[in-house]
Image (cartoon, rainbow, N blue to C red):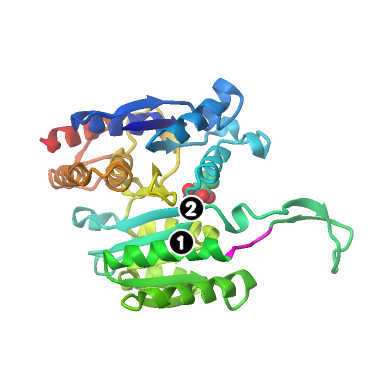
Amino acid sequence: MKIAILPGDGIGPEITAQAVKVLNALNEKFELESADVGGAGYAAHGHPLPQQTLALAKAADAVLFGAVGDYQYDKLERALRPEQAILGLRKELGLFANLRPAILYPELAGASTLKPEVVSGLDILIIRELTGDIYFGKPRGVRTCPDGPFLGEREGFDTMRYAEGEIRRIAHVAFQAARKRGNRVTSVDKANVLETFQFWRDIVTDVHQEYQDVELEHMYVDNAAMQLVRAPKKFDVIVTGNMFGDILSDAAAMLTGSIGMLPSASLDANNKGLYEPSHGSAPDIAGKGVANPLATILSAAMMLRFSLGKTEQADRIETAVKKVLAQGLRTADIFEEGTTRVGTEQMGDAVVNALA
Ligand code: IPM
Ligand code: MG
């Protein structure tokens, strides 16, 4: 089984190194191959998603991705910015289903900014459509305003759109995921204002006919944002579009206290996937050896589970992570009085030891 390792920028290389260490400790016959991506891809090959990197990702059974982005690349034209690497991979690999679990580990209840009783036991799964919506809709750009009170001025514009098949396939993913969990789906939209999302609601309702055993609720995105901080435990599976999912998944991540703990999976129709931590490249702490590698290590566990069919090994990693938390080991982002502060490498080593 071939795994493409794309470390990227900022803390990306440090955290993926820990996940690689854990994968190697499993004693499986994985073939790991690394390639440059993001700012590192631009620096080495003049493009954030170099051709050889894309080719490797396509040829691999799964992709483990670190993070991309660094200050020095912020001023590049959009097509050359690090973010284009991840958007390009999603599109080129057809990774339309983004799974972002938000789980509160009991040991970390104190790390949340919300009251413990609001978040303890939290276990929600956000399923974000990842290759459509306003993110990829065309036309887009800057043009001369064709009408209205600002006629003739310059205007920026994007296109929000969802095809029926696009909505159907992500709805199926959500209902099927719900059956393996709490059997409830909340579909988040803006049907009261947007044509695209009235259509979304209609199609999700139609797909639901095939899943009468699953409870379906529709919710407007503004209300969903409010409910996420008011009573997050009411949610089981949330399914939504690309843009709303981007925003809500960051909010959900913070309920758990640390975005440094949350993995994610981006899957195609055949469960081939790209796995990455939910957090970014954190250039401010890059190279300091203090970043939390657990989200990336847990992403590797998701990869074993969803793309490589190695459920037992995935369980082993997840159990090992719980063990190191129970041992009181904490990186800076989750540190609390009375626990032991460790660096990136020490945390990786601790997980490897806990696998035994
Ligand atoms: C994410 C990120 C990306 C997105 C950026 C880096 C393009 O915020 O994965 O949530 O907006 O999808
Ligand atoms: Mg985001």
Hey, which quadrant is residue 257 in on the image? Answer: bottom left
Q: Amino acid at mark 2?
A: Phe
Q: Amino acid at mark 1?
A: Ile
Check disc 1: other Cα within 10 Å, few if <14, some if 14-19, many if 20+: many
Residue that label 2 marks: 96
Q: Residue at x 32, y 29 (%)?
A: 17
Side of 46 where 276 appears, left or right:
left
Percent of width and height locating residue 155? 79, 56
Hey, which quadrant is residue 309 in on the image? Answer: top left
Above/below status of 95 relative to 193 = above
Total count of labels: 2
Which image quarter is the C terminus in? top left
Above/below status of 163 relative to 79 = below
Q: In front: 94, or 277?
A: 94
Q: Is residue 157 visible?
A: yes
Percent of width and height locating residue 73? 59, 32
Instruction: Report the predominant secondary structure element of the magenta stretch.
Output: loop
Mark number displayed over residue 170: 1
Above/below status of 58 relative to 254 = above
Are the residues flagged by discs 2 and 1 in contact, CB closer than 8 Å? yes
Q: Is residue 251 visible?
A: no
Point out the tag, 2 or 1, that comes first from the N-terminus. Answer: 2
Instruction: Tell whether position 161 is magenta.
Output: yes
Most distant residue in the right direction: 152
Hey, which quadrant is residue 152 in on the image? Answer: bottom right
Bounds of the magenta span?
159-163
Percent of width and height locating residue 95? 47, 48
